Amino acid sequence: MLYNGRGIASSTGTPRSRIEDMADDIALVIRALQLPQVDLLGFSIGGFQVQEVALRHPQLVRKLLLLGTGLRGGDPKMELKVLGVAPNPVPTAEDFLYLFFGRSEAAKQAGLAFWQRRHQRLEQDPPSSMEVAQAQAEAHAAYLQPLPGLKPYAFLSAITQPTLILNGVQDVRIPTINSWHLSQNIPNAQLLIYPDAGHGAQFQYPERFLKHATQFLDE
């Protein structure tokens, strides 16, 4: 099941500006669907959200998949070019290649193949609004602040669910080192780093990711 938060794409409402509130909304949806427990996949800012679901509503989560994401108080040093490209309301193929894929010719071809697959979907989500961008930027900035009085990343020890962490070797949006920190501080975590890939490693290597994800979920 795919989920759009409040005010995002086809969902109505006012976009949330705190990761914790976004996580509570996910928990509300799970309970509304009367699902006793679920596997959660979070990509990018979605990865922050599903971490918080596991921390705030642990009984609802069986396994976690964290893709191209970071952690509270993590390394924020994205490439400066990202700030000029990511806000484009209607991204071009070139924008996608830069933001999500590796730099080799093979990576670019994989990116263009993803771009074509992306547009085969019959029901396309409407572009996110500036209100969404502002709310998510506020939420992201707040989440980069470490929790006071705690050893960095110590809070992650409370995530006891099996966790698969995936990133590309060079993530220009959320530095790949954050994936390492996740894997070192979530007790039952495993880390995959795909070569010649970036923020959207799962898009660049869809068959490989499907095999890894299926194996992880079936274990």
Image: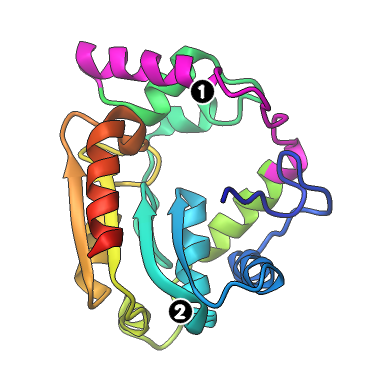
Residue 78, quarter of the rendered image: top left
Q: Is residue 176 visible?
A: no
Q: Which residues are magenta?
A: 103-132
Q: What kind of residue is marked 2?
A: Leu
- Which percent across, then down, holds residue 208? 22, 37
Residue that numbered label 2 is attached to = 147
Disc 1: CA contacts within 10 A as few (<14), some (14-19) or many (>=20): few
Q: What kind of residue is marked 1?
A: Arg
What is the residue that sits farthest to the left in this orientation?
195
- Which percent across, then down, holds residue 158? 36, 84
Question: At 43% across and 67% down in the image, what residue appears?
Answer: 72
Residue 107, quarter of the rendered image: top left
Depicted 58 relative to depicted 173: above or below: below
- Which percent across, then down, holds residue 113? 37, 15
**48 with respect to 29 (left or right):** left
Question: At 51% across and 77% down in the image, what residue appears?
Answer: 60
Depicted 96 relative to depicted 140: above or below: above
Rendered image: mark on residue 47: none
Question: At 31% across and 46% down in the image, what residue appears?
Answer: 175
Q: Do the residues under discs 2 and 1 have CB atoms within 8 angstroms?
A: no
Residue 79, quarter of the rendered image: top left
Q: Secondary structure at mark 2?
A: loop
